[in-house]
């Protein structure tokens, strides 16, 4: 998941670290390979003190002077590791005041990497602004290592745009049952699979579930959700193909009330935000079913397109949360980083594969750990 972005962030992290170390006067580990050569090169240097021989007319002092200057220079280099190592310890203990110019280069690189990986421009700007605000002009304690400082700054910048997420189990516990969740979004993005996965997830968390087969539009859609539900031992409420989806979902809610079911999950037909008839059908579903949560489903692999669609959908119809499917096929992670900040609604789950267990409750901390993990 997000492997391309992960690798690039590793490089950026190193770049920030070396720039900050340089600004703080911490030398990189000395190579110490050239040391043996230096004393030998210095030895044959003629001593200016031995001016007693009669061969004095030649101004031999001219070549001797630069050589004499080189010897102390080489001596300084030899001393360097001890000196800088001592300094390193001192710097770690004190605060460093970084300037814009110290981190300008890695900041620009970070900006490029985020944009290349489909992070939306305003979100990229926000991450850069947070990094700059955290580092520049602030007295920052270097602490145990510069890398730790860089990682914690990156972590808080990313967490800042990812928001808080939404814990579905907690939401259900805090709301009147049945909690009604409507899944909607563009066709083929994984709505039906997500309904099945969420049903399975909720059952594992101790909640009872009923599914409404609200996609009466596409041929085979009712059988598809029914097959999933049967495999998972979840009751499905269905009508004929072509029936009014509002009626199906109304019946599903009635069933849940009559049987004390905790959660209603409503599958719907794929709809584009500009397809007027499907949109008006969705409005009717909302009026009749009165969902507690309208969840917009789109694919992480669609990158910025998914973010734009989610935003438009939210503005047109209203969304309470987002699910991004196919995160397992997305090397970039741009949609996952951008969507919550852009739409202003939390990501509920990431879909991470085609199995029923391949669903991950969205936790900003876990996603940032994944992105900044060392194993990339
Ligand atoms: N790799 C991967 N594939 C997924 C994921 N979620 C769904 N899919 C696949 O995406 C395809 C479409 O999934 P559906 O659940 O039928 O999508 P839908 O949005 O209901 O489609 P329509 O009902 O036609 O609008 C299926 O082949 C799923 O197995 C996921 O998280 N990862
Ligand atoms: Mg479907």
Image: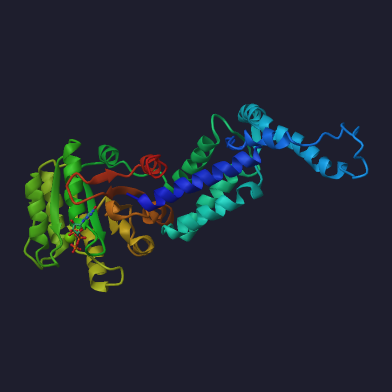
Q: Nearer the viewer, residue 280 or 272?
A: 272
How many marks on residues? 0
Instruction: Tell me which corner region of the image, top left, top right, bottom left or bottom right, holds residue 298.
Output: bottom left
Image quarter (top left, top right, bottom left or bottom right) of the C terminus: top left
Judged from the image, the quadrant occupied by ligand 2 is bottom left
Does 155 sit left or right of 362 as displayed? right
The residue at the point 13 percent across, 60 percent down is: 247
Residue 91 in the image: above or below residue 304: above
What colour scheme has been applied to the protein in the rendered image?
rainbow
Viewer can see residue 323:
yes
Q: Is residue 12 above or below residue 42?
A: below
Outermost residue toward the front in this view:
54
Relative to 17, is 193 on the left or the right?
left
When asked about the image quadrant of residue 49, the answer is top right
User: Horizontal and vertical percent for residue 201?
Assistant: 20, 42
- Residue at image position (63%, 41%) is 22
Would you place residue 215 above or below residue 59 in this image?
Answer: below
Left or right placement of residue 306 versus residue 124 in this view:
left
Percent position of residue 82, x then y: 64, 27
Q: How far across and how far down the image is residue 263, in percent?
A: 19, 45
Residue 234 visible at all = no
In front here: 266 or 351? Answer: 351
Along the line of sight, the residue nearer the viewer: 210 or 370: 370
Q: Could you tell me residue 68's position as x and y percent?
A: 80, 37
């Amino acid at each position: 998941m997000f492997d391309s972005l992960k690798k690039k962030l590793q490089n950026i992290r190193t770049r920030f670290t070396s720039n900050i170390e340089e600004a703080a006067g911490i030398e990189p580990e000395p190579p110490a390979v050239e040391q043996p050569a230096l004393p030998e090169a210095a030895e044959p240097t003629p001593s200016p003190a031995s001016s007693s021989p009669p061969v004095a007319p030649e101004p031999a002092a001219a070549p001797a002077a630069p050589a004499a200057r080189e010897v102390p220079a080489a001596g300084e280099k030899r001393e360097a590791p001890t000196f800088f190592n001592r300094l390193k310890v001192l710097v770690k203990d004190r605060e460093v005041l970084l300037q814009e110019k110290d981190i300008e280069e890695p900041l620009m690189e970070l900006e490029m990497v985020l944009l290349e990986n489909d992070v939306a421009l305003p979100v990229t700007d926000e991450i850069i602004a947070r990094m700059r605000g955290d580092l520049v002009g602030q007295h920052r304690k270097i602490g145990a290592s510069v890398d730790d400082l860089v990682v914690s700054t990156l972590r808080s910048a990313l967490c800042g745009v990812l928001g808080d997420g939404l814990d579905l189990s907690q939401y259900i516990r805090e709301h009147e049952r049945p909690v009604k969740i409507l899944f909607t979004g563009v066709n083929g993005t994984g709505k039906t699979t997500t309904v099945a996965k969420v049903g399975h997830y909720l059952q594992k968390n101790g909640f009872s579930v009923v599914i409404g087969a609200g996609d009466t539009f596409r041929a085979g859609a009712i059988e598809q959700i029914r097959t999933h539900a049967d495999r998972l031992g979840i009751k499905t409420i269905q009508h004929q193909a072509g029936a009014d989806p509002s009626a199906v979902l109304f019946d599903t809610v009635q069933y849940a009330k009559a049987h004390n079911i905790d959660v209603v999950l409503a599958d719907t037909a794929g709809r584009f935000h500009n397809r007027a008839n499907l949109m008006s059908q969705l409005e009717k579903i909302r009026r009749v079913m009165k969902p507690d949560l309208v969840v917009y489903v789109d694919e992480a692999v669609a990158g910025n397109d998914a973010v734009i669609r989610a935003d438009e959908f939210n503005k047109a119809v209203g969304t309470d949360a987002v699910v991004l499917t196919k995160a397992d096929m997305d090397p970039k992670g741009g949609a996952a980083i951008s969507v919550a900040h852009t739409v202003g609604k939390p990501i509920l789950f990431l879909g991470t594969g085609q199995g029923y267990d391949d669903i991950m409750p969205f936790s900003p901390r876990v996603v940032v750990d994944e992105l900044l993990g060392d194993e990339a």
